[in-house]
Amino acid sequence: MKNVVRAGAVALTAALLVTGCTSTSGGGSATGSAGGTLTILTAAPKIDLDPAKSQNLAITTLGLVERRLTTWKIVPGKTPEVVPDLATTTGTASDDGKTWSYTLKDGLKFADGSPITTADIKYGIERSFADQLAGGLGYHKTLLVGGSDYKGPYSGKELSSIETPDSKTIVFHLDAAYGDWPWIASMPAFTPVPKAKDKPATYGQNPVASGPYQVASFSQGSQLTLKRNPNWSEATDSVRTAGPDQVVFKMGQDESTTTQTLIADNGDARNSFGAGYLGAAELAQVKANPDAAKRLATSQAGPLSYLAINTQSGALKDLAVRQALEYAVDKKSFLIASGGSSAGQTASTLITPGIAGRQSYDLYPAGADGDVAKAKSLLEKAGRSSGLSLRLLTQNDSASLAQAQALQQGIERAGIKVTLKPEDQTSFYSDATATSANYDLALYSWQPDFPSANANIQPLFASSEIGSGGNNVSHYSNPEVDALIAKASATVDQAAAQKLWAQADKLILQDAPVVPLTYAKQSFLHGSNVQNFFIASFPAYPNYLTLSLSK
């Protein structure tokens, strides 16, 4: 399989992870009324609405303004579904999954009243290949025939693997079969962009809206205000409810101040929520306030924090040594260092909760605090009873260091010396994804870009993802796993594909290239008038598209 993740997937430390699960907050199931101004308080210093440059989740900011061929149906208590958005279906596969065709719904219009055509979607995708618009999710760039060499439309060239035989039909030709293409078609680049309105340098400040809202005013770094798009048709949109009359984003907000404002729940705060999840100290403050605690939404366990083992480094080439680490790690102490049960639960699999096809199992049943005797036995078998010293790469923020120290102390119980290698975030990701890895262990976390086991497995364990910015931090290579990943990726039948991904999950862990540590949780706080505020099984983030306000 080609390297389709490097351009898009988001790898995050446990301290920064955004997670998925099933939960509703107090009042979250109530029905709101149309109208009012919803305010979203975000620490982000800026917002860019250009779909080509975005890694935005389908259910958050850009989803209010822009639609795609497909989108996500997010419902509490249910596994996420990919559903039609601008298209009539999630895609029709032919040529054994190498060709995908779509037909647009009737009556689709931009905010200016002009019709949305497949030429607009083709152009929107093509512009995402331009170097000046880099940074967005880029799975499609290496999946489409000719995509690896295409540089965008600004030189006058089109991408011939995207065909638009008429204004309502669009056809994609892929280099190889890809069963998860319907999820790819839900990504920001699949937003229609009218060529005549495209100004690459400034398009993100006022894009031509296809969703229920359009830009009313935009002061970058300060405030973005959205107003209703009069040409959005609810009859064509099954996922957006467009409750508020206006949506206001206030940027650059101090998260601690935001938490205190929302706890107080006065004035405009009642119609607001924080876009960032709560830290451990803030979460404790909210739980200590009975009224605020009712307005808290906490996810169930979601994405994976794990200890990557460099399988090409010295003694770690030996399976028995890697298996010893599986038993030596104290997951309970790691969880406590992460914030306790409110921050997650201990993990044992690679496919995470909330992802279709996940099977629950534990190949290394060491208990939450490890099995030191078993670890020592395996080290003795490997001839490594003493003298083994390992370097653990971690970020140098306080949260990551606390987690790394918990790992260090747990592993050292088995007689292995662990030296921490703390680095700033930029250096950490540069070193962790380099071709020549200067570490033995690395503390890593992963949030998939879309809810498929593919996004859990391929970017982290395919040999094509070793080095050069890839996220196979374990430098793990197994031809049998590569073949299984390729087969699962090419399988259009999702039930069959899920079985293959489950097989890959177990096959990989038999080789012990990582120690699964925790499935993370996140908590969000909202004001008392905000309704329909929930966190589904994926992602662990509020669904902006269905929020409303009580009178």
Image (tube, rainbow, N blue to C red):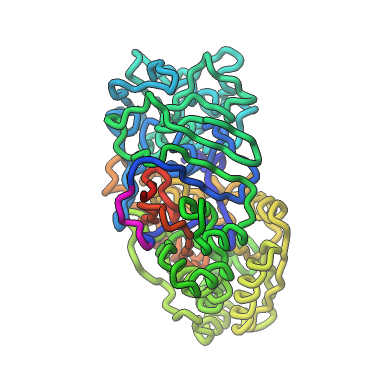
Q: Position of residue 229 (x, y in %)?
A: 42, 28
Q: Position of residue 526 (x, y in %)?
A: 46, 57
Q: Which residue is drawn at the image coordinates 42% and 37% (left, top)?
A: 245
Residue 161 in view of the camera: no
The residue closer to the viewer here, 185 or 501, is 185
- The image quadrant of residue 82 is top left
Residue 109, compared with residue 257, is above or below; it is above
Total numbered labels placed on residues in the image: 0
Residue 365, compared with residue 184, is above or below; it is below
Residue 431, compared with residue 404, is above or below; it is above
Q: Is residue 494 left or right of residue 443?
A: left
Residue 84 in view of the camera: yes
Q: Which residue is drawn at the image coordinates 51% and 78% (left, top)?
A: 332
Does 27 lie within the magenta span? yes
Q: Position of residue 534 (x, y in %)?
A: 38, 55
Magenta-highlighted stretch: main secondary structure? loop
Q: Which residue is drawn at the image coordinates 61% and 29% (left, top)?
A: 133
Q: Which residue is drawn at the image coordinates 40% and 71% (left, top)?
A: 363
The residue closer to the viewer here, 49 or 392, is 49
Does 524 lie within the magenta span? no
Q: Is residue 420 left or right of residue 126?
A: right
Q: Which residues are magenta?
A: 26-32
- The image quadrant of residue 155 is top right
Q: Position of residue 429 (x, y in %)?
A: 66, 52
The residue closer to the viewer here, 183 or 535, is 535
